[in-house]
Amino acid sequence: MIEHVKFTKNTEWLKPFIAASGSLVPLDKLRRVRGFRVARGLEEQVEASCIRYRGRFSINLRMQNVPLSKGEKYTNVRYEPLLIALAHELAHMVEWEHTYKHFHLMSKIMKKFGRVIDKIGIEDTSFRWDNKFKKNKEIK
């Protein structure tokens, strides 16, 4: 179902979430899912974006937070805001404008995500995404 979608290394773990939304979103029109980090020194203004070009979509997700001071490392975003941003961008594939229909679809996508979270065994979405997925490589 999503074999044609190109994922960056840091977004591959999102495959089960995106696949779960397949009954709500035309995944055949999804071209790529790319993760990025905000460059050092720039403010975090973008959580995610959905780019529509010639009827196909690309989703970009901010996967890492900017370090707070010069010596700190980038830290991974927590599950909850990341999955909310992903659901929001997937909803754009059906309802481009921020209307009631867009947010209603987004809530349906989040319900699908909830089932995936339960299946994987994530007990607390306030954890950073790398912690659980490094331990659980058998996600399908």
Image (spheres, helix red, strand yellow):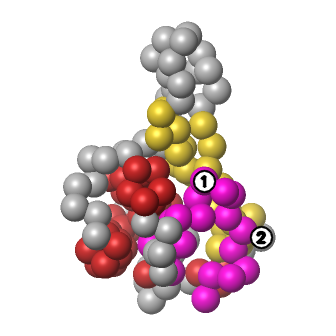
88 vs 33, nearest the viewer: 33
What residue lies at 63% left-to-right and 43% top-to-bottom? 36
Q: How many marks?
A: 2
Q: Position of residue 108 (x, y in %)?
A: 31, 76
Q: Mark 1 points at which residue?
A: 10
Rounded to the nearest angstrom, the CA distance separating label 1 from label 2 is 26 Å
Instruction: Quarter of the image for the N terminus: give it.
Output: bottom right
Q: What element carries label 2?
A: loop
In the displayed structure, 136 sits above or below 73; it is below
Q: Is residue 2 left or right of residue 108?
A: right
Q: What stretch is highlighted in magenta?
A: 1-19
Q: Which mark is drawn over residue 48?
A: none
The residue carrying pointer 1 sits among few (fewer than 14), some (14 to 19) or many (20 or more) residues within 10 Å by Cα, namely some
Q: Quadrant of residue 101?
A: bottom left
In the displayed structure, 64 sits above or below 39; it is below
Q: What residue type is labelled 2?
A: Arg
What residue lies at 38% left-to-right and 46% top-to-bottom? 128
51 vs 84, nearest the viewer: 84
* Residue 51 seen: no
Q: Name the residue under label 2.
A: 54
52 vs 139, nearest the viewer: 139
Q: In this view, does 105 lie to the left or right of 95?
A: left
Name, please, the residue furthest toward the right.
54
Residue 15 forms part of the magenta stretch: yes
What residue lies at 60% left-to-right and 37% top-to-bottom? 37
